[in-house]
Amino acid sequence: MEPAMISVAILDDEPKSILSLEYELSLFENRIEIINTFSTVADALSGLNQMSIDCLFLDIEMPQMDGFRFLEKINPRNFEVVFVTAYSEYAIQAIREHAFDYLLKPVDGEDLDRVLTKLEDKKKQTQTTPHEKILLNTDQELRMIRTKEIIYCESEGSYTCVHLICGSKLMVSKNLKHLQSQLQQFPFFRIHHSYLINMDHFELLDKSQSQVLMKSGESLPLSRLRKKEFLEVLKNQLKY
């Protein structure tokens, strides 16, 4: 089995820097997929909530706020961060901010190859050693659930309704983004800002209506922003 593609996004306030990094990444197109690029912090904060990525390539010096302050607003953070900066003095602070790695502008191909190899190794580790159960916290109890028993998770404001194959539902006192971070090692995909589905329970996609049909009979909406990535996930599953 070939290693899974690394999915990434880019945040940089300079369009030329985005184009430059996109070009360097395109040289590794068999290993990496660029899901989206952002030139403003506001767009990135909104967009990252709608997608699942392995890594964010993040500029440090930006007019709205720097990369370090930006990361403080991402909680929980369910992706790695590689800082991309023209200033080497930021390297130590980047490490302190729990960055996965950093790259100096202009990005060197060998350095990028090194970072991608580290990302692939990290992804391989998490995919080969997943736990089969997660602990769900409701207002009344803590319950251990097998991930394969979850059909999908539905956002209910600051709560999440977890739909199980037995027909019951659990109202979990965590938002959907938190559940997504708990389940990122398993075959779950966020098809919409309100829905996170278990791909093992996926039946078919009605492309004309942008509706996802689950084996249990539920029909759920597929977000326009997630459609391209979802189709890629389906294609990758066919390879195996």
Image: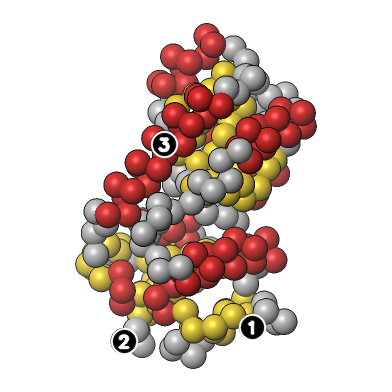
> Residue 122, image x and y in percent?
35, 42
Inter-mark Cα distance, 2 to 3: 41 Å
Kindly identify which residue carries mark 1. Answer: 206
Q: Amino acid at mark 3?
A: Thr
The numbered mark at residue 117 is: 3
> Residue 198, image x and y in percent?
42, 72
Q: Earlier in the sequence, mark 1 or mark 3?
A: 3
> Residue 168, image x and y in percent?
34, 84
Q: Secondary structure at mark 1?
A: strand
Q: Earlier in the sequence, mark 2 or mark 3?
A: 3
Inter-mark Cα distance, 1 to 3: 37 Å
Where is 54 relative to 240, above or below?
Answer: above
Q: Amino acid at mark 1?
A: Asp
The answer to whether any part of residue 137 appears in the image is yes
Image depth: mark 1 or mark 2 in front: 1
The numbered mark at residue 142 is: none
Q: Secondary structure at mark 3?
A: helix
The one nearer the camera, 212 or 107, is 107
Kindly identify which residue carries mark 2. Answer: 166
